[in-house]
Amino acid sequence: MQLKAQTKWGWTIAAYLFLAGLGAGAYVTGVIADFAGEQWASVSKIGVALGFPCVLLGTAFLIADLGTPANFWRAYRKPGTSWVARGTIIISVFMVVGFIHIGLWLWPFGVLDDAEGARQFIGVVGAIFAFGTMIYTGILLGANRPIAFWSTALVPVLFLVSALSTGMMAVMLIATIDGAAHSGPISTLVRIDVVLLVLEIIVVAMYLQATHRVPESRAAARLVLAGSIAPLFWFGVAVLGLMVPLALELLGYYVLDGSSAATVIASISGMVGGLCLRQVVLSGGIQAPLRAGRFEFAIPNT
Amino acid sequence: MPRYGFVIDLKRCYGCYSCQVACKAANFTPQGIDWARCVSAETGSFPTALRQMLPLVCQQCKEPACKEVCPTGATTQDENGIVLVDKNLCMGCKACIMACPYGARQTVGDWQTYFPDAEGQLDPYEAYAKKQWEKKNGYGMATKCDYCKDRVAEGRKPACVESCPAKARTFGDLEDPESEVSMLIRREYGFQLNPEFGTDPACFYLPPR
């Protein structure tokens, strides 16, 4: 019996999951940096500035994937009934707060520049919904009971760690290109990102280990590790997403003494890996076979 | 109120795909959409290999997984237990397609002709079917089997039941203990597919040999 993976959610949904995670992760990085003192001000601005546009772009991908994109507003009809509906509310609130944060602080108004308390309050509110955005996507996939590869508690954790890491990389990338003026904060970000990458390696390993229980998730793990999406996993996720950034960040920190080139390459490579990770998880979505007596029927793909 | 259900006898089905074709004819489903389907599986190895067919329709679950994940309220259950999609509320997010354990939900982007030489031109029969489909279902939305709701309301049986030459399919009211489906389920050990998903389907199967 050959179990087939779903094909209905493809690269556009992967791009959405990736961009929403990246935007929310960058925003959280920016908000935390805002609490860290004067020399972090520009890093904080970069993070907050990345949040809303990235999530908006991701949402555009999500809407483009709908069968009838013009009807996307129907997702607001029944808030709280399902994870798509809840996520729509979470991500909308995040975008509104992120937009206000940018509008009142960076451009066109600068009213929050001196009002540190108000700025941090908006930041904390936004960060709560940013965490919601990072986590809910994993829960959304997990709500599909027949797809055991998604229906585990580790998908939200995996998406959260990856979102924080890719968001931080985006901030690092822009800050490095922006100039060497933030070398102190950047080297701190690099060190935190090393921890996140190590965590992500552990979560990916645990996630794949946890697939052993049922045939459909074993089939998904085979597909990921040795099947048709193995190149994407080993090259895209393992090498580009985890090994290259980890090696370059360690190298840049200990040997090259904060080399800009190492940070830039590590960030771009890690972000590509984050996109590949979403696609790998999506294309491992194999539905449980139907059982009748001693027969197992694979559900045909439509 | 009745709860409509199916009993499909796996001993009787020999995989002629009449149900699949009859459903297409009755519901004007476009290319790529089959509300009634037949899938096959094999087990064992020579000389004791066995092949078994499994006819699939929407299972019209009491606790539908598709309704649980539907964000727009497009998925509803009518008084007969039939799960319906409102094309004026669905937005085509495909969440229900992922959540349904039985693969009952499908979606299609556009009507395409079956004939490769037609260069996109529909013949009159296809044009008629396209009109009928659009009236009821639309494109880009989730679509699914409704146990031929309109035929049943007229007192007829669903198309796949009428067409089954092996008489493997029985349609009736599960709430009525005297109905043929209820008797078959009781007497011949009817079972539901994959009960572990907790959906309580209204489609019962009688065990294969």
Image: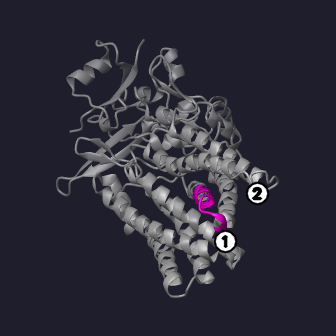
Residue closest to the eye, A280 or B175 = A280
Most prominent secondary structure in the magenta stretch?
Answer: helix
Residue position marked by numbered label 1 in the rendering: A175
Seen in the picture, residue B133 relative to A33 is either above or below; the reply is: above
Residue B190 screen position, x and y as percent: 26, 28
Q: Quadrant of residue B5?
A: top left
Question: Farthest residue in the left direction?
Answer: B47
Q: Is residue A214 above or below residue A273?
A: above
| Magenta stretch bounds | A24-39
Residue A248 position in % (x across, y down) = 51, 80
From the viewer's side, name the closer residue of A78 and B52: A78
Task: Left or right? Give the position of A269 relative to A61.
Answer: left
Is A25 a magenta residue? Answer: yes
Position of residue A279 relative to residue A176, above or below, is above
> For mark 2, what is the residue?
A106
Subunit of mark 2?
A
- Taking the spot 65% from the left edge, 68% from the top edge, the residue there is A39
Residue situated furthest bottom in the rendering? A255
Query: What residue is at 28 percent from the left and 57 percent from the top?
Result: A212
What residue lies at 66% left-to-right and 33% top-to-bottom? B134
Asked if the magenta segment contains residue B154, the reply would be no
Q: Same subunit under labels 1 and 2?
A: yes
- Residue B82's spot in the image, x, y percent? 47, 24
Q: Which one is earlier in the sequence, the residue at label 1 or at label 2?
A: 2
Q: How is the image coloured?
A: one colour
Q: Give the residue type at disc 2.
A: Leu
Rendered-image quadrant of the N terminus of chain B: top left
Q: Which amino acid, mark 1?
A: Ala
Marks 1 and 2, how far apart at CA:
16 Å
Horizontal side of A25 relative to B152 (left or right) equals: right
